[in-house]
Image: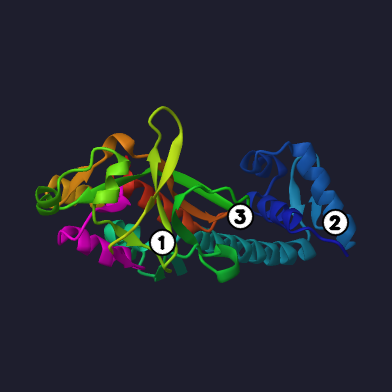
């Protein structure tokens, strides 16, 4: 016996309206189509559900009992669909986020606090790392990345250009002078962020076209952007930092930019998440909030 729930829904509507005409108006379905579908239901069941005359219709005793069961099943199905709709509409579960430490510490706190307040049923897990996390392999939902995104398994939204700035403290520049060209860095103390002791290059726009890299000998070397940034503030040398990380201290004159005419963009600031046919509503709401909150960030 192959009975469709949709046919049971139609029969429940006919029984409630006590006429094919009333049910057809309610369902916005032609009366002839509705009558044919009920006839097919009766044939599949092997039971007459409706007595039809030229003036009226009447349920048979089996039809009355069946109509009651159909109405109950329709209510259960509608409740299940509404519950699933709530699952789609209300963020819940765990949201795992990863970001570059400088970007995360500079901009994520207000986004995370607002999201956590709006959606208390969501558990937040945040990993700040310079490592490029494999979102799918490691089970992360959202990442903030700097540079370029060319992974077909990810869906991304560019928040703005990822510019870098060369900065030093005003005290350092008074003491050592201001470099005028990238070549002048050979006579300056530079702050290098690198995990090993290998050679380091900084990107600059070429004198005529394109970009070029200058090898930097750093007096102060570390593997932490936070330590490097504090060293620049302390006057230990010239460092290179993302625009979003140093914009506030430049405005406050705790740092001064140098070589701005030579700086280059290094891609975009991206918000990415795994591409899915049916987007997770928790991820959707976070992307919407983060995009809105970060619209006025220094890259905008």
Which residue was labeled with disc 3?
A: 276
Residue at (88% x, 59% y) in the render:
44
Residue at disc 3, secondary structure: loop
> Going from the N terminus, do you reach mark 2 or mark 1 first?
2
Q: Position of residue 134 (x, y in %)?
A: 56, 64
> Going from the N terminus, do you reach mark 3 or mark 1 first?
1
On the rendered structure, is 247 left or right of 100? left
Q: Position of residue 93 (x, y in %)?
A: 47, 70
Extreme residue in the top direction:
208
- Colour treatment of the image: rainbow
Distance, label 2 to label 1, CA atoms, is: 61 Å
| Of the two numbered discs 2 and 1 in the rendering, the one whose residue sits closer to the viewer | 1
- The range drawn in magenta is 220-245
The answer to whether mark 3 and mark 1 are in CB contact below 8 A is no
Q: Position of residue 1 (x, y in %)?
A: 88, 65
On the rendered structure, is 280 left or right of 7? left
Q: Position of residue 220 (x, y in %)?
A: 27, 64
Which residue was labeled with disc 1?
A: 99
In which quadrant will I find the C terminus? Answer: top left
Q: Is residue 280 magenta?
A: no
Extreme residue in the front direction:
187
Q: Nearer the viewer, residue 8 or 220?
A: 220
Which residue was labeled with disc 2?
A: 42
């Amino acid at each position: 016996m192959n009975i469709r729930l949709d046919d049971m829904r139609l029969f429940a509507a006919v029984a409630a309206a006590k006429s094919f005409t009333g049910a057809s108006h309610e369902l916005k379905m032609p009366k002839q189509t509705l009558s044919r579908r009920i006839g097919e239901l009766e044939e599949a069941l092997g039971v007459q559900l409706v007595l039809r005359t030229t003036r009226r219709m009447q349920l048979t005793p089996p039809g009355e009992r069946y109509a009651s069961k159909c109405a109950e099943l329709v209510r259960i199905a509608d409740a299940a669909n509404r519950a699933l709709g709530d699952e789609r509409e209300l963020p819940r579960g765990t949201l795992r986020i990863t970001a570059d430490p400088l970007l995360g510490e500079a901009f994520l706190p207000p986004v995370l606090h607002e999201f956590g307040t709006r959606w208390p049923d969501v558990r937040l897990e945040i990993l700040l790392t310079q490592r490029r996390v494999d979102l799918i392999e490691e089970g992360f939902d959202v990442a903030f990345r700097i540079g370029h995104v060319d992974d077909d398994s990810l869906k991304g939204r560019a928040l703005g250009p990822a510019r870098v700035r060369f900065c030093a403290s005003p005290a350092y520049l008074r003491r050592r002078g201001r470099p005028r060209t990238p070549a002048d860095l050979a006579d300056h103390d530079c702050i290098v962020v690198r995990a090993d002791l290998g050679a380091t290059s900084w990107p600059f726009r070429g004198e005529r076209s394109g970009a070029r890299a200058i090898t930097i000998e750093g007096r102060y070397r570390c593997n932490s952007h936070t330590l490097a940034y504090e060293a620049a503030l302390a006057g230990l040398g010239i460092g290179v930092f993302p625009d979003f990380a140093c914009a506030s201290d430049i405005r406050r004159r705790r740092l001064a930019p140098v070589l701005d005419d030579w700086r280059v963009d290094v891609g975009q600031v991206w918000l990415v998440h795994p591409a899915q046919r049916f987007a997770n509503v928790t991820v959707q709401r976070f992307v919407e909030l983060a995009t809105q909150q970060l619209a006025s960030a220094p890259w905008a």
